[in-house]
Image (cartoon, rainbow, N blue to C red):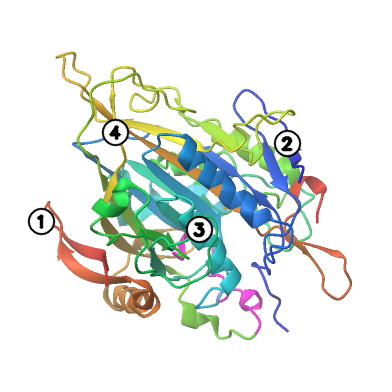
Amino acid sequence: MPPRQCYAPNATAAGLWYLDRPLYPDESGAVAVAVGVVAAYRLAHPIDIIVVNVHAGPNFEWAPAADREAFLRSLSDAGADLVWGTSSHHLQRMERRVLPPASTMRGGDGGGESDGAPPRRRSDDDDAVAGGGRPIIFGLGDLLFRFRPGVDEPETCEEGMAPCEQFRPALSFVYEFIFDLPMTAPATPATPTTPKTPAGGAAVGAAPAAARTTGAALTGIRAHPTAHGALQVQPAAGKDRAWLVRTFRRLSEPFGFSMREDTAEDGSRGLWVVPC
Amino acid sequence: MPRKVPGRPITGFAMVALVVTHAPHSVQGRSVSIGVTGDVNFHPNLTSYPPEYPWGDLRPTLLGFDLLLINHESTAANLPDPTPNNYKYEDPMNYTAALLAAANVNLTGQANNHQFDFWGEGMNRTIGVLSSLPAWQQQGGLFGASENPSPSYSDPVVFRLNDGDDDGDGGSSASIDVAVFSLVAQLCHKDPDTGEDVLDSCTCGMCC
């Protein structure tokens, strides 16, 4: 399956490649390739946290189709600490994924739970907030968009899904994932595989004297509700906030996550995603 | 009859395209916070407002994250020859960089179905605009960054966050590495009736 190149690399850009094969239905093995990329990276690199952003969709459907579920779950099973699905233009569920007992390279063979799965990484044991699983976001909504898809331009509403007002595309969550570092090991040469060191970024890049961590444990998921207009986003309040919480619970609780109001260490009140 | 837009049945490509836009914070203590958001694009009229304006009262929250990752579902381009998909999301050109910087956005996922609304030239212009940010890198390439793909073809963006204990007192510092991949699977598809290519946004002028 040779890749095709969109634009060439240069001093600052790595170029862009793509597979001219369909992912869904996966008749050409493209899903396996994409998942394999993540799995291979997880196995080969001492990375603490892997985030996989997926342009997942779908738009204006409360439940993703089975092939999309399978793809995102496969990425989680392959070693992604967080699968971050976007582009649905409205809130979809967050799922708590526990590794299936058999293969870690295939997904879609179950729901958000799979009892008896041995944890493959240390953090799976320690991630109290995820209850031994990894979060998969199927959709967050739009943080800031110049119009409300499906509503301000009704022709963008998916066929058969009208009225798209039901999806409240102006409302969204910003999710804050809090990872705790474990105890540090004795200092060893840091050998990040592909460190990125933006100019002026003192906190980024190789740190020769740094002790390497052995993984990070997910210890909290905070949800910041938002509402946007054409020009600006604001924290959601009142009925908008209540709708977001209610919808999150409806969509996510069958898949292992709920949401509750709680107090943070700094004393602030907020919404937290919790296992259920 | 309503059209099924902007999302199509997923039968397209897979690719990776990320843009690192800002240097992340130091890790405070022994934990890191990673903020992830939904789609972002900017109204062209925002050029009449200060760059902080679009983030409203949410801005302090966004500034508090060690890493802020957004899905930038747009281009910073406005060219006369858009792709024929009827959804041409163009941000206010050069002002986009200032808007992103105002929220300390660390990374924009560019792998979505609107990156080629203005063909490859639009994407190039977007990269040019984002390159004006103080700390910027673009990472892409499911299969690598050269004409001869190496075994490291799958490299994601990697952030290394330190705990800031570099005061020379002999104490060790800790660091945490965060790798971010980005995939899109939704650029174009074949019409099931005609077998013809249907463009959502067509990569490099090629499709299906």
Q: Where's residue B101, x and y in %? A: 42, 39
Amino acid type of the residue tagged 4 in the rendering: Thr
Q: Where's residue A23, x and y in %? A: 67, 60
Amino acid type of the residue tagged 3 in the rendering: Ser
Name which of mark 4 and mark 1 comes first in the sequence. 4
**Neighbours of disc 3 within 10 Å: few (<14), some (14-19), many (20+):** few
Q: Pinpoint the chain carrying mark 4.
A: A
Front residue (pair A206, A108):
A108
Amino acid type of the residue tagged 2 in the rendering: Tyr
Name which of mark 3 and mark 2 comes first in the sequence. 2
Identify the residue under disc 3: A103
Residue B10 placement: quadrant: bottom right
Q: Is residue A149 magenta?
A: yes
For the record, the magenta segment spans A140-159
Q: Is there one chain holding both mark 4 and mark 1?
A: yes
Q: Quadrant of the C terminus of chain B?
A: bottom right
Please tell me which residue is depicted at 50% across the width and 52% down the height of the picture: A53
Q: CA distance from mark 1 to mark 2?
A: 49 Å
Q: Is residue A145 visible?
A: no
Q: CA distance from mark 3 to mark 4?
A: 27 Å
Q: CA distance from mark 4 to mark 2?
A: 36 Å
Identify the residue under disc 2: A7
Residue A267's disc is 1
Q: Relative to B173, does residue B106 appear above or below in the rendering?
A: below
Q: CA distance from mark 3 to mark 2?
A: 36 Å
Q: Is residue A57 magenta?
A: no
**Neighbours of disc 1 within 10 Å: few (<14), some (14-19), many (20+):** few
Frontmost of labels 4 and 2 is 4
